[in-house]
Image (cartoon, rainbow, N blue to C red):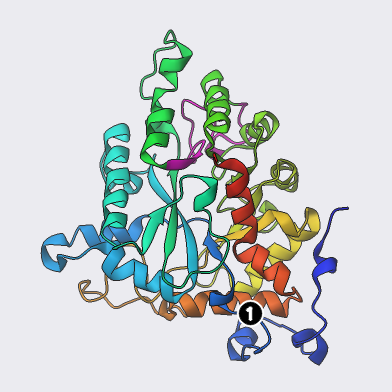
Amino acid sequence: MTLNRRNFLTTSGLAATGVAMTGLASAMNMPRFQKNKGPHDVVIVQGHYDIWEFNDRLALEKEAQNSPLRDFLLPRLLEGGVGVVVMPAGGEAARHRIMNDQLLAGSMRSTDMLLREIEKTNGKASVILTKKDVPTAPDKNHVKFFLDFEGANPLENDAEPGLHKDQRLSLVRNFFRLGVRGIQITRDGRNQLGDGWLEGEGGKLSRFGVEVVEEMNRLGMLVGVSHVSEKATFHAAEISKKPIVASHSNPRKFTNTLRDPTDEEIKAIAKTGGLVGVRYLGEGETSYNTLAQWVDYMVNLTSIDHVGFAWLGHDLGHPKMGYVPGFSKEAPPSGEYEKMTKYEQNSRFMDTLYQHKYNDEAVAKIMGGNWLRVIREVLPD
């Protein structure tokens, strides 16, 4: 039987008090219920964490002489209760390649940078490679990284159609050997695999796109369809034998942009066993209450097992792209979320989910449990 939101109503806390949740301001002023779980009580999986902060801090290497991960980001992740981060290790935008203009070489440099940064953490961070690496319980001293590509163009630049299939897929396997475990098919535009959302409804995956999805299934890699056109998303859902994800996407019904999935796309993703992860869009655009409402919508559309979260906004340690505390000259952003720590962000969002009448089991699934299941289903033993 398909479980929906009604199966996960709380019978205590805010639901019992009869207090109505009217918006973010109300959520901010309400204390956490002690009986409810907080960020360190569940395995939190951040389904998308862009590489902005690494780029910004590495640009200051001569002044800072510090590791962006070890000295800045990792302490905030640990304090915030984050157990797993899905992190782009390459892709189609220059910022996914440390601002390098070469698709393959830049992605290689980005992957190397992240692996080196993880090595510097003295065992406090690691890369998820197999099922056994997926956490089963919170660990306040360790963060695991799931390396992803945001757009597959680095896999084959100026492809030669006559190449043998094994040769066409060699870069997929080589990045797998380096530790990359997920690839988003496109990033906005058209590439060798298929169409991004900028192509409108788009077309199905190319022959090479089908081959890449099949090879990813065989190897144990997660197929991503954020930024992908409708027809390419449906095609990926049709041919993939394992769950696929729209890791950082909101329901199009509310955002009214081709960048986000329709109800039918959300259902198709869920049918594979996959999930959609909601993302914060910016101060004044989305509140945590709005994100929770979008969670409500997708849970009722599919089930509690197919929704996660991607990103809750910039935090105090990196309040916006291009701003480095202690170095940037301009005033820091004035938005409320940009002034929060990661712990405060995760705690506020969890509280908002409780206020939307989800119980402990449901909140744990939304905050990371669904991601953990999908990752285990996809990865090799």
- Is 259 situated left or right of 62 in this image? right
Along the line of sight, the residue nearer the viewer: 116 or 228: 116
Residue 220's spot in the image, x, y percent?
54, 36
Query: Which residue: 47% across, 42% down?
Result: 181
Up-down relation of residue 336 to residue 168 (above or below): below
Say how many tags the image has: 1
Picture quadrant of residue 14: bottom right
Q: Main secondary structure of the magenta part?
A: loop
Residue at 80% of width from left, 69% of height from top? 8
Vertical order, 227 against 74 (above or below): above
Q: Residue visible at 49% across and 31% down?
A: 190
Q: Residue furthest right?
A: 1
Is residue 330 or residue 135 the one in the foreground?
Answer: 135
Residue wearing tag 1: 37
Q: Residue furthest top?
A: 162
The answer to whether one can see residue 318 in this image is no
**Which sits in the foreground, 316 or 12?**
12
Q: Where is 366 relative to 353, above or below?
A: above
Q: Is residue 58 left or right of residue 37?
A: left
Q: Is residue 280 magenta?
A: no
Q: Position of residue 68 (x, y in %)?
A: 27, 63
| Vertical relation: 114 (above or below) 201 | below
Q: Which residues are magenta?
A: 180-204
In the picture as drawn, the residue positioned furthest to the left comes out as 62
What element does badge 1 sit on? loop
